[in-house]
Image (tube, helix red, strand yellow):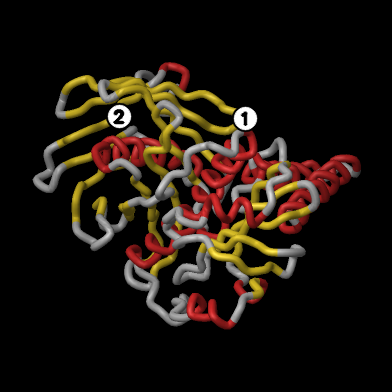
Amino acid sequence: MKEDRIMTWVGVLAAIMGLLSFSVGKWIMGGIILLLSFGIFFTRGGGRFNDRSIYEKVIRTDMDIRELYEKLKDIETPLGKAWIAEHKGFSGDSIVFGPNSFKDCVVISRSGSKLDIKHITKIDNIIRDESDEYRFRDFINDTDIEVTPKRYAIFVSLKLASVMLIRHLQELIEKLDADRNTPIPSDLDFFKFYYHNSYEGWFKDEEGNDLLRVESTYNPFVARVLDADGNEMASVVPRASNGKGVVTDSAGYDMYADGEHFGEITRHKIKGLDAFTAKTEAGEFTIKSFPACLRANVSCNYTIEQDGELKAVIGGSPNILFDTVGRCQNDVVLSYDDDLMVLYAELEIFIMTLNKKFLK
């Protein structure tokens, strides 16, 4: 929560400076500072702490750490199974998932009347027995390796997976707090990841194999998914635009698959954040944005859900510098249900195409 408070105060101070600039007639400077303040609060998510922070959640409960550990200890996660240690920022035992090769950990600790679920990479804050030291070996030193789209996609996918694990642990613990007999899943949040960069124009799998081609421009609006032979598999088409080619969101969008109408997309807001509803022949999907994942340098992030079940996560990076291909857009899709991979690709390229209007 310390980092969240610092960012909140930065936003507040920026807003005050902007208003002071207005008061002395410096309109342009004041406008710029207020836009900065708005950007800080927008990326934090606004609202309650649990809405603002993607790295930390709090739950008011009297559930003991050891009692909770007994419930969670056999769950398999992308960060491994839970184990017991201590964290320098909290008193008593903590439950730890991880670390992985990039030092990602999710730590559950008691803070007064609340449980705190937190993503950390500062592994020196974890106080552990010597018998657990084996967990802290073979880390990747990302300062000494060539940065490629594939390596960066691996890095981003693990950060996003940690964020999703926090969310789902929060949901599970809240259910356990209400009913100690809540069924415990055998695993949480295992995924496959795919990535796409604008330099190569391919959706690739974890091994770097080319799967799907994509085409994307904002004006004229093009968001298409193609097979390896260049045949269109899926696309999204805006229903209306103005004389300058700017898309009219209120008119909605049509989805096509194999040349046939497949569904429609409408844009709206959920708790003030960008969201879409896609009604398709495969069912209805809700696509919701969430605050920037700054530790992965991805700022265009969305979850894809069907009937409240997470199907995929999109992480968009509009301008990343790579050692191999220079600056380009590099996006990641975490898939929790591979039967819908073409749909995820279609939604990802559609959303990132919409955001190109902010990158001119």
Q: Is residue 252 above or below residue 85?
A: above
Q: Is residue 268 above or below residue 315?
A: above
Q: Residues within 10 Å of mark 2 (few under 14, many from 20)?
A: many
Q: Which label is found at residue 236?
A: 2
Mark 1 secondary-structure assignment: loop
Q: Which label is found at residue 272?
A: 1
What residue lies at 54% left-to-right and 37% top-to-bottom?
A: 181
**Can I make out residue 287 in this image?**
yes
Inspect the image, locate mark 2, and give the three-letter code of the amino acid beneath it.
Val
What residue lies at 17% left-to-right and 35% top-to-bottom?
A: 233
Inspect the image, locate mark 1, and give the three-letter code of the amino acid beneath it.
Gly
Which of the two residues, 332 or 126, is positioned nearer the viewer here?
A: 126
- The picture quadrant where one finds residue 330 is bottom left
Instruction: Please report whichever mark, 1 or 2, sits nearer to the chain's N-terminal start.
Output: 2
**Left or right: 354, with 293 as reference point:** left
Query: Where residue 112 appears, x then y in whole percent?
Result: 80, 51
**Left or right: 115, with 72 as reference point:** right
Query: Where residue 21 appears, x then y in whole percent?
Result: 85, 46
Q: Is residue 97 above or below residue 32?
A: below
Distance from label 1 to label 2 (Cα)?
24 Å
Mark 2 secondary-structure assignment: strand
Which of the two residues, 91 or 89, is positioned nearer the viewer here?
A: 91
- Which quadrant of the figure contains the N terminus? bottom right
**Can I make out residue 254 in this image?**
no
